[in-house]
Every structure is written in C-alpha cells, then in structure tokens.
Image (cartoon, grey):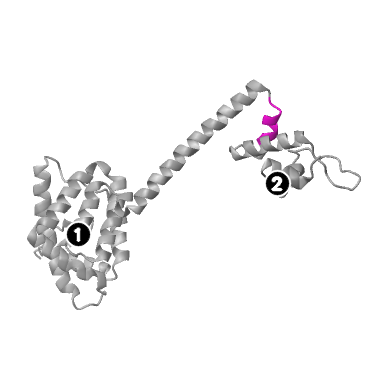
Amino acid sequence: MLTISQLARYAGVTVRAVRHYHAIGLLPEPCRDHSGYRRYDAGAVVDLIRIRMLAEGGVPLSRVHQLLDAGGEEFAAEVAEIDRRLRADIRERQHHRRQIARLAAGDSLALPAEAVAYLERMRELGFPDRVIEIERDSWILIAAQMPDEIPVLMAIKHATLEHETLRRHYLSMADLADCSPDDPRLPSLADRVADFLEAASTVATAVAADAAEEEPVVSEELSALLDTVFVESFPCAARLLELLEDRGWTGWTSVRRMEPVLPRRCEEA
C-alpha cells in the first residue's frame, strides 16, 4: 500500500494535484488506516496516470471523468475529437507565430511590399523618422480600406520621390515636424507645400495615365480620418491648412484646388 506522497511520485504529479482530484471527485479518496493516513493501491496509480495523461492532452478536468468511464468506441471517438481540436489549436498557434515573425520584420506587418519599399526609400533619402511614421500609419489605414488600389497609389508615391524637384520640396516639408502654429517659418512652408501640390498633381495624372487607370479616389470618410491623423500629429497642421486655403488648396489627403471666388457684380440702382 502507498502513501499519498508515493502515489504522486509514481504517477508523476504533485501531492497538491492528488488532493485537488480528490476534492473534485475525479479520483476516489481511499479509507484511512488506523493511523489516519490514506493508503493507495496499484489501481489508484493507474487511474491517476490516466487522469494525468488526459489532462496533459488538453482534456478539461470536467470531462476527464466522463472519458474514464467511457466504453472503447466512445473513448476512441472522444480522443479523435480532442486530437482534432489540438490540431486546430496548433494551426492557430502557428498562425500567431507567423504574425509575430512579421511583427519582428517591422513595417511589413500590416503593409504590402510596395508600401514597405516606399518607406525604405524615404529612409534612404533622409526623411525624419517622425514624417516616416506618419506616412506608415496613414498607409496602413489606406491599405486596409483600398488594397486593390495600392499598386497605382504606390507608383504615384514612388514617382514623387524620384522626381528631383518634388523630392526637394517634400524634404523641405519635413519642417512640419517641429513647427508650431505661430512659427515664423510657417508661411514659407505653406508656399513650399503649395508648390509641391501643384507639381505632384501633374505627376499623379501622368503615372495613372501610364498605368491606363484612373487615379484612385479616397473616400470622404477615409480622407477625414487621415486628415485627423495629420492634424493630431503636427502642432502646426491646422494653421497650415488655413494658409493652404489662402493659396487655393483645400484638404490634405484628398487635396484639391479651390474654385476661385468671383466678385459679385453690383446691381444697378
């Protein structure tokens, strides 16, 4: 006859586990001897080993008792179901591992290859990290909503970066990162942004034409969200948008030239 410590050691579990199995009715508690100690036989060791193996196999303790009492066919069917769930769990965990691996890869977690290459090119050209971060977050939002349009949009962005004049303008716009609403540089920055928008619109039209596609249109809802990201990211953004309107441009994501306001003709008396 075995003590509880010996039973636990033979079955490869802890004494605490044995007591827990007693408490939930999974392992019958034997009678105590004249000294008041529990004494276990070999059958208890076998039962405890089976309990341990089922628990380690992922079977909830609430179902272990049912399996221990099941007949051959029922037990086999239950084990097959457990195996199916375990294989599904393994597939899910493997998916999680791939996601973690992509996370370790940085930008490629949520961006298509074209966008990742664009951000890498910005780094090569010396754009500030803050500007690149805003671009990255914006493109994550766009790629999630407009995946089919990403190739054309990225072709436009790459053409913008490789256009010498536009690249110079864009690099100079990096002043956005540390400009305040009352910064004396802001009017000059607004002039540079307006020049950039003028030239960029021409490049975008040309790239879309070469691709035999229309330039993708960002929805009003997504444009509003991206504009909010811009305004919240740069202290001077709201003031800059006002200055751009003075220069004939409105919006930031779906930027467009404003229609000129014609003076009203005075009615003849």
Q: Position of residue 156 (x, y in %)?
A: 15, 50
Considering depth in this image, is 53 or 61 the residue closer to the camera?
53
Q: Position of residue 267 (x, y in %)?
A: 11, 63
Q: Position of residue 69 (x, y in %)?
A: 71, 28
Considering depth in this image, is 84 or 141 the residue closer to the camera?
84
The nearer-to-camera label among 1 and 2 is: 2
Circle nearer the N terminus (1, 2): 2
Q: Which residues are magenta?
A: 63-70
Residue under label 1, please give it: 122
**Label 2 residue SS:** helix
Q: Main secondary structure of the magenta part?
A: helix
Residue type at the position of mark 1:
Met
**Mark pair 1, 2: CA separation:** 58 Å
Considering depth in this image, is 20 or 269 the residue closer to the camera?
20
Q: Residues within 10 Å of mark 2 (few under 14, many from 20)?
A: few
- Residue at 49% over, 34% down: 87
Residue type at the position of mark 2:
Ala
Q: Is residue 76 left or right of residue 199?
A: right
Quadrant location, the C terminus? bottom left
* Residue 188, quarter of picture: bottom left
Q: Which numbered disc covers residue 73?
A: none
**Label 1 residue SS:** helix
Residue under label 2, please give it: 17
Q: Position of residue 124 (x, y in %)?
A: 18, 60
* Residue 232, quarter of picture: bottom left
- Residue at 11% over, 47% down: 207
- Residue at 12% over, 45% down: 208
Q: Is residue 247 visible?
A: no
